[in-house]
Amino acid sequence: MLEEQLRAAGYEIVPFGQPAELGIIHTCVVTREAETKSRKYIHRFLRQNPGAVTAVIGCYAQTAAEAIAAMGGVDLVLGNDAKMLLSDYLDLPRQDAPVVLRPRPERKTFTIRFEPDGPPLRQRVNLKIQDGCDTMCSYCYIPFARGRSRSRDFGDIVNEATALVHRGAKEIVLTGVNLGDFEQDGRRLADLVDALSALAPQPRVRISSIELTNLPETLFERMADPAHALVPHLHVPLQSGSDTVLQAMRRPYTAADYLALLGRAAAAVPGIGIGADVMVGFPGETDADFEATCALVRESPLFYLHVFQYSERPEVASVRLEDKVPVETAGFRSEVLIQIGEEKKRAFLEHQIGKTLRVLFEDCEGEHWRGHADNYLEVAVESREDLRNRFGRVRINALQGRLLFGTIETME
């Protein structure tokens, strides 16, 4: 959305690393590595573009504005609730000191400025519907950067989705910090996906990530309905398969709860693709705790994993926990779990051979077009036609590496 605001204001977007008159560094603090990368990109842009207007926005701007302002050369430091106002500040006279705006996020329904008109869209688009989180997991820094849970105005979401569809968007990905918390005037997530499914032309609707404890199981019947826009794909963070570790993390479920819900999803939605975030190296995690995580993943219908090593952040409760796991041990556990995830993914991919999947084609390499199926599997076909941003039904014939290959049966 910021990119579209800037294009509407007459800016031309260039890849990061090329000479620019304006640099926008959108920052993250979810891990120490993310924070380090944010600082690196700020310094890199300042070094390569002396004299350019430099804006640092997002989570690091929210939590470390003073440190950013002290770097020298930064003109704007905009926290999460101010970053969408960036274009309002670009024409102001430059100051000796940076403009710093990081209002504390208010717990109220919000709207987002978007461009209703614009160039045609030929790729999937993100649609933010929620921000912040109330759960306060012991390791998580997000509430300090994003604030408490709050939802976007229902009508504002539908209006932007309508504009995106009219501009050619074929897939809308719902994003937020804790999507299942979405509630606005009594309407919840299921009501929202129904409203988006009713748009014409109907887009494909995908949920980016959703917590187990507020995942409405009424979504399963929508995913199983081929006439509904909601695709059969879930990303449900696990973090650990050990109840002891989950309790220390302040995660509000047990390993059995997690496994049971995923089992119900797999039974209700044939062919559903399910992924998860998993953390290793949390303070106090024993070999037995880690083995419990490995066992749960093997038993579950998960087909892909995002594996993270525990990263200690300031202010979070887990800083006070003892029995820190050595970095080397966490690294070994990460590699083991990644390998289990690869085995799970290959088994799921092999199971697709002979099936027909609905694919939205995204890009081309040579004569092979690639895209993602409804259940988030990547599929390739050979074609000399321009298939970009078109749906096709593809019969899967083979698996090469991590990529499914097939032949087009019909195009929509």
Image: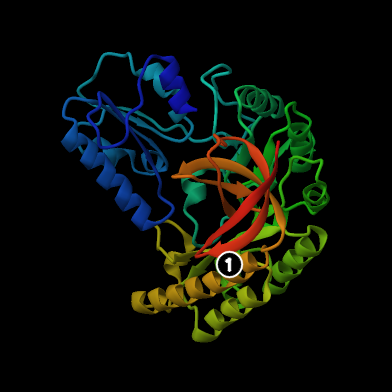
User: Within the image, what quadrant is residue 263 found in?
Assistant: bottom right
Residue identified by numbered label 1: 345
Looking at numbered disc 1 in the image, what kind of residue is underneath it? Lys
Please indicate whether residue 195 sits to the left or right of residue 174 in the image.
right
Side of 148 where 22 appears, left or right: left
Q: Position of residue 104 (x, y in %)?
A: 48, 35
Front-most of 40 and 109? 40
Judge left or right: residue 309 versus residue 244.
left
Residue 79, x across and y down, in percent: 42, 35
> Quick one: which residue is furthest to the bottom in this view?
288
- Which residue is found at the position 40% from the left and 56% from the top? 31
What scheme was used to colour the molecule? Answer: rainbow
Res 376 seen here: no
Judging depth in this view, the residue of 315 and 379 nearest the camera is 379
The local crowd at label 1, few if under 14, some if 14 to 19, many if 20 or more residues have their Cα within 10 Å, is: many
When the figure is inspected, residue 325 is found, relative to residue 410, above or below; the finding is below
Above-or-below relation of 300 to 205: below
* Above or below 122: residue 262: below
In the displayed structure, would residue 405 be above or below residue 205? below
Q: Position of residue 339 (x, y in %)?
A: 49, 74
Query: Taking the image as drawn, is residue 240 in sight?
Result: yes
User: Dividing the image into 4 quarters, which one contains the C terminus?
Assistant: top right
Residue at horizontal 50 percent and vertical 85 percent from the top: 287
Q: Residue at x 61, y 80 (%)?
A: 295
Tell me the SS state at disc 1. helix
Spot occupied by residue 51 in the image (x, y as percentages of width and height): 17, 25
